[in-house]
Image (cartoon, helix red, strand yellow):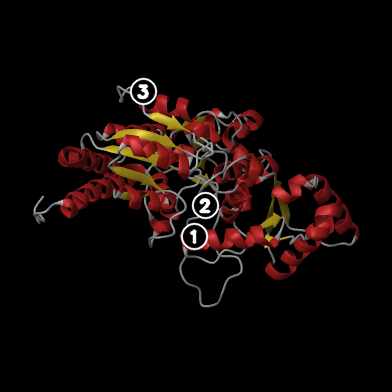
Amino acid sequence: MTKKIARFKKTPDAYVSTTNACKLCKPMGACLAFRGIEGCVPYLHGSQGCATYMRRYTISHFREPMDIASSSLGEKHAVYGGGPNLKKGILNVIDKYGANMVGIATTCLTETIGDDLPMLLQEFHVEMKEAEVTLPILVNVSTPSYSGTHMEGFHATVRAVADQLADQQEPPTGSLPTSFVNLLPGLVSPGDIRHLKDILADFGIASVILPDISDTLDGAPQVEYQKIPPGGTPVAHIRNMGNAAATLEFGRTHILTGDTGGQLLAERFGVPHYPLGMPIGLQECDRFFEALATASNRPIPDKHQQERGRLVDAYVDGHKYISGKKAIVYGEEDLVVAMTSFLSEIGIKPVLCASGGNSGYLQEAIATATGDILSEPPLVEDNVDFYEIADKAKSLEPDLLIGNSKGFALARQLEIPIIRVGFPIHDRFGAQRILHLGYRGTQNLFDQIVNAVIAKKQTDSPVGYSYL
């Protein structure tokens, strides 16, 4: 008699592992934010492996050297605590780098073993004072990776810097004039930061952009290797953020957490807070430029009105190629929201908006950003990996994938184009210069999308059209 063997039937409920997570680790975001502060060395309180992984990851995106110091904990420190190595490591950073500031982020290991970082740093300050050693500025942030994504680490760091450094008592110093605004743009490209600076200058607005990675992660070559690259937000400017006339802060899901750097500045110093979506697409760009016009009490400069007009004209010209196409958008939550709003207004149907983030606000933010454009809301999935995105894609039959390089394997499997945006982009050159923001950045993205659709049609055609 043949024994019938019960076969395990795989169902979505049985899937418990993570396959190619649609997010990166929390302390990586902290390191990127610290890198945008002048004279700052990012420092991980954890194992050497964490720092090595992050250096490799960020270098392949930005194509720049990225030093990240570490307390290099081993097995015995997991038992006895990492305090001694933390202090020794900071002294090494002072000796080797001469840093003005050390930005210290925790990791899974040090959070799990219970190292109290603020207390250890307080002890360290006392010990160094007794030894008559002058310490640089030490800023700390809690970033265990199991509690969030790289974006949450990035935002937590911006908030921690504002919390531990910003003041209202000191008069503006250095190149900072009496009247200025704070701009908290989130994790955007160095090219985006440079463009934001130009836009602010066109309105005659002085600003403190935190962080500013425009030079530190995309700089000119130096005759000699610079241990700390030039550029970044000056610490003196950060100390004056409480004196700003206003804070503009990007990120629709981020704002909904109620715990942002801009909200802290508003609560502690009364700095007016203007939460905005990432300025991608006409709708979100219009809100950003209107906010700048209000803050500066000036009309929108003709240069930007012309860029807006050219973008509208491009929408009209390109509509016949992309109308009705379906796209899957994935990546960082706020970027997903902005791209979904943009796709909606150009006639592409976002069929799946996915993120590894788990703020709980993704669906609400997308509904707010697209409510008056989309007649049918898209499928929204947070806390997902690429296994789950691929599983959904089978029935959704998208024409495009839009997100970072980690979706390439899926795009290849589906034989559809991928439009690379956000972070990380490892398989193309120039990721640090991709322009996402403003009318000009939207124009770049629009042209990429239209050309990707045309190229796909051309490739699939048995005729091989040369005129489309």
* Sequence order check, earlier mark of 1 and 3: 1
Kind of residue at disc 2: Asp
Label pair 1/2, CB-CB below 8 angstroms: yes
Using the image, determine if residue 245 lies above or below residue 198: above
**x 18%, y 54%: residue:** 459
Where is residue 76 shown, x and y percent of the image? 83, 59
Residue 41 in view in this figure: no
Left or right side of 81 for 368: left
Furthest residue toward bottom: 223
Mark carried by residue 371: 3
Crowding near the residue tagged with mark 2, few <14, some 14–19, many ≥20 C-alpha atoms within 10 Å: many
Kind of residue at disc 3: Gly
Kind of residue at disc 1: Asp
Label pair 2/3, CB-CB below 8 angstroms: no
Where is residue 371 shown, x and y percent of the image? 36, 23
Using the image, determine if residue 225 lies above or below residue 73: below
Furthest residue toward front: 1
Looking at the picture, tell me which residue is in the foreground, 259 or 246: 259
Mark 2, residue position: 212
Q: How far apart are marks 2 and 3 (CA)?
A: 33 Å
**x 25%, y 35%: residue:** 346
Left or right side of 129 for 380: left
Crowding near the residue tagged with mark 1, few <14, some 14–19, many ≥20 C-alpha atoms within 10 Å: some
Instruction: Give the image quarter of residue 42.
Output: bottom right
Mark 1, residue position: 215
Looking at the picture, tell me which residue is in the foreground, 351 or 127: 351
Element class at badge 1: loop
* Sequence order check, earlier mark of 2 and 3: 2
Q: Nearer the viewer, mark 2 or mark 3?
A: 3
Where is residue 216 shown, x and y percent of the image? 52, 60
